[in-house]
């Protein structure tokens, strides 16, 4: 089963366990029904912002959607052993950029932070949508260059540079130029039990 199908199956499992219809989840998460159906069928590569909204609509942490077997003990990931959790479409339907996420805390129970190594591939189109969601993000550039658009400002970051921002402001992260980049990203999303 591909990572996208595993993610879709997990969304469906959690939705059905709560006796929620696709319509109910769409309303609670402020997401289109068609997008949820496509995610569940493994036909849509999600972006992070809608996935955070779906997790919130299901009253779970983002990690609950991404993990198979959460546990309370520390999680150790050895160099080169992180598996790709999911490939996200980074910037919208007309901006063909992909982000390959490698989890650094997979299966850590009740976490509020989501640390990832992310391979950022260049976008093909210039007109890309911005993302916004609850929480904060920290990015540290490991290889290549990235461009972070935050509100009306743009930041070009090179190896060793970092940025920390409030995710409720419209933002986008993409590779600068035509080369891949690699970043360490930590996404914090507040969670309040319903």
Image (tube, rainbow, N blue to C red):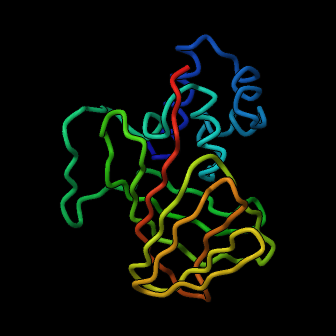
Q: Is residue 135 left or right of residue 95?
A: left
At x 64% / y 49%, what residue is drawn?
A: 49
Tell me which residue sits at (56%, 80%) in the image: 146
Q: Position of residue 155 (x, y in %)?
A: 63, 82
Estimate the x, y position of residue 44 in percent, counting from the top left. Answer: 65, 47
Residue for point 62% across, 56% down: 167
Which quadrant of the rendered structure holds the C terminus? top right
Of the pair 22 and 136, the residue shown nearer to us:
136
* Image quarter hosting the N terminus: top left
Q: Quadrant of residue 15?
A: top right
Count all numbered tags in the image, as a single digit: 0
- Of residue 140 and residue 96, the one placed in the foreground of this image is 140
**Residue furthest to the right:** 127
Q: In terms of depth relative to the viewer, which is nearer, 15 or 155?
A: 155
Quadrant hosting residue 34: top right
Q: Where is residue 166 shown, x and y percent of the image? A: 60, 58
6 up-or-down from 172: above or below:
above
Q: Is residue 94 above or below residue 30?
A: below
Up-down: is 175 above or below 132? below
In x, y percent, where is residue 134? 62, 46
């Amino acid at each position: 089963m591909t990572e996208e199908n595993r993610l879709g199956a997990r969304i469906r499992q959690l939705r059905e366990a709560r006796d929620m219809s696709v319509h109910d989840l769409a309303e609670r998460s402020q997401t289109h029904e068609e997008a949820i159906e496509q995610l569940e069928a493994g036909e849509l590569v999600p972006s992070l912002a809608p996935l955070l909204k779906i997790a919130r609509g299901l009253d779970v942490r983002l990690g609950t959607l991404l993990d198979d077997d959460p546990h309370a003990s520390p999680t150790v990931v050895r160099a080169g052993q992180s598996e790709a959790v999911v490939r996200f479409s980074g910037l919208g339907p007309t901006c063909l950029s992909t982000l390959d996420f490698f989890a650094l805390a997979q299966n850590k129970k009740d976490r509020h932070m989501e640390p990832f190594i992310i391979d950022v591939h260049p976008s093909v189109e210039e007109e890309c949508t911005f993302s916004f969601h609850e929480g904060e993000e920290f990015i540290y550039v490991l290889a290549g260059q990235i461009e972070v658009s935050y509100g009306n400002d743009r930041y070009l970051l090179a190896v060793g540079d970092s940025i920390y921002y409030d995710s409720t402001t419209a933002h986008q992260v993409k590779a600068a130029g035509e080369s891949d980049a690699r970043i360490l990203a930590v996404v914090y999303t507040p969670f309040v039990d319903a």
